Image (spheres, rainbow, N blue to C red):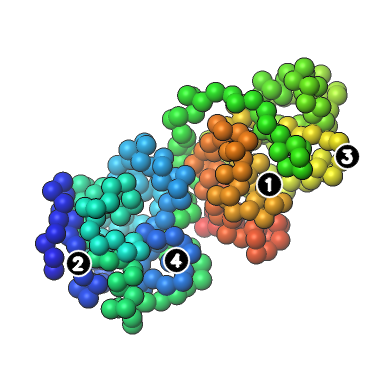
Amino acid sequence: MSENTLSSSSIVQINPDELVIDSDTVLIDLRTDDSYMKGHIDGAINFYLPKTLWVRFLKQRYNYGSLKHFILSTDNQYDKLKNPPANTKFVFYDNDTTFIENIEEEPLRVLTEYFAQSGLSVSYIKGGFEAAKDKLINMIVTESYSAKYSLIAPKHILNSPIQSPFQKLKTDSGLDFFLDKGFMAIGSEQDAHNIELLNQHNVTHVLNCTPTDFHPEVLSTRVIMQIPINDNGTQDIIGYLKQAFEFIHTARSTPNSKLLVHCYAGISRSVSIAIAYVMWAESMSYEAGLKLIHSHRNIADPNFGFIGQLYILDRYLHTTSLDEAIKLTKQFMLS
């Protein structure tokens, strides 16, 4: 075994043929879920934080305890991660990293250091999966998506009130209409109550994503819908999607209509509903939807709970009906 360790922790590099998996071993695959399903070392659990979550992970300087909020695994695996016995051995691998000293803010370097600094036994496979797949050919398996081995869907985020600490620093970026040469915009509660602004942009429909009532003049002059969403990590948004989509679709089918989707600040709730809509209507992934919305609302920043729900929805939305995708997502959230 190579005695190549970082000075800040006791992280050991092992060659693929030195890997021994027993009841004390937790093997963690840090590649994308798609790569994981195409082939991984038998028994590995997949930990993949999408870019938006990974940036937050780094900025908020999570410790090992808060890392548990991102984990979905079997009960036995979660118990080991929550309260790891002293003899637990954590083994990580990514796609092809040979020396973690050569990488900085990459998952393999950051996560192995977090685990090691907690006094846990940590090692990583030299050369990652690319090196292991040839030397451990009898241990490589493929698998269709299964909650049993996936950590991408942040189940514990869905039950956590964690929100972005950067939201209070954001400011309204104004209305920027998009889709169909300017059909929909995302805005704030202040925008929705600004009659002059609504008239200026010829807004005909308003989707209110808060529990707060409409301004009386808005109620009397525009087609409106309210879905009373709270901006916290425990709020279920999936159950509101079908009615929101139907409202947006009806508005979009109406000639010369313009829609404002708003919440209190136009940062999280309205953004999440808009992302979900373009995922469905424009056949986009979550990441593509976020990119589109962010290009028209640069303060877009869904809370962790909403991100988790949309990532789960993304797994089902493009392979089945909307009703079925919503059903499967809600089942997944409750599992």
Q: Which residue is mark 4?
A: 35
Q: Residue at x 32, y 38 (%)?
A: 61
Corner quadrant of residue 99: bottom left
Q: Which residue is mark 3?
A: 255
* Residue 322: percent from left, percent from top: 70, 57
Q: Which residue is mark 1?
A: 277
Q: Are marks 1 and 4 in contact (CB under 8 Å)?
A: no
Q: N-terminal of the two: label 2 or label 4?
A: 2
Nearest to the observer: residue 137 or residue 43? 137
Tell me, yes or no, if residue 73 can be seen here: no
Image check: 195 left or right of 22?
Answer: right
Label ID, residue 14: 2
Badge 3 density bin: few <14, some 14–19, many ≥20, Cα 10 Å:
few
Q: Residue at x 85, y 23 (%)?
A: 220
Between the residue at mark 1 and the residue at mark 3, the CA separation in whole angstroms equals: 19 Å
Between the residue at mark 2 and the residue at mark 4, the CA separation in whole angstroms equals: 22 Å
Between the residue at mark 1 and the residue at mark 4, the CA separation in whole angstroms equals: 27 Å
* Residue 270: percent from left, percent from top: 64, 35
Q: For numbered disc 1, what is the local secondary structure? A: helix
Nearest-to-viewer mark from 1 and 3: 3
Query: Looking at the picture, does residue 85 appear above or below residue 54?
Result: below
